[in-house]
Amino acid sequence: MRVRGGYPRLGRLLRQRRRVMAVGLAMTAAALASTVPREAVPREAPAPHRVAATATAERSAATVTAPVRIADADTVRLLRPGDRVDVIAADGSPAGGAEPHTVASGARVTAVPEPGEGPAESGALVVLSVPRDAAARLAGAGTSARLAVTLR
């Protein structure tokens, strides 16, 4: 048994479904295009030396790398690049009266150089990535107090 006019209705229904699907895909593409940040869409391929200079300038505005001598060399051997540490300054003498205080909080370990030829009592060097103002505090505290780190 055949129904008259059934085939054209089926064709029309399929064409409408295709149109609906096309409109849905177009709207999805437009929504995705509008959510992409402008920085992520390259206008033209920049020169490699400009990319490196821009990345370095942006990073240096936010953080700097600071070499810091930590009093306990054995503690420094526990550190690995990428670790987060708090740097604490304490006066060397118990009669000094100064309380230990945190100089830099959440500093990222950038590098742990190999120990030098000097005595272990002089401490060990660690390179930290910190904000510019924390680097100034670290440099000042390193000249007048013994520095220690706590792993976060």
Image (cartoon, rainbow, N blue to C red):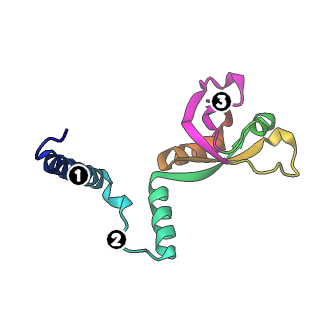
Residue picked out by circle 3: 150
Q: What's under tag 1, amino acid-wise? A: Arg
Q: Position of residue 42 (x, y in %)?
A: 37, 67
Q: What's under tag 3, amino acid-wise? A: Thr
Residue 43: mark in rendering: 2
| 58 and 7: which is toward the camera | 7
Describe residue 25's horizontal placement relative to residue 108 as left or right.
left
The Cα atoms of the two marked residues, 1 and 2, are separated by: 34 Å
- Residue at 61% over, 51% down: 66
- First in residue order: circle 2 vs circle 3: 2
* Residue 66 higher or lower than 99, as above or below: below
The Cα atoms of the two marked residues, 2 and 3, are separated by: 45 Å
Magenta region, residue range? 82-110
Q: Secondary structure at mark 3?
A: strand
The quadrant of the image that shows the N terminus is top left
Q: What's under tag 2, amino acid-wise? A: Arg
- For label 3, the crowd category at 10 Å Cα-Cα, with few meaning under 14, some 14 to 19 and many 20 or more, is few
Residue 137: mark in rendering: none
- First in residue order: circle 3 vs circle 1: 1
Question: Residue placed farthest to the left in the image?
Answer: 5
The quadrant of the image that shows the C terminus is top right
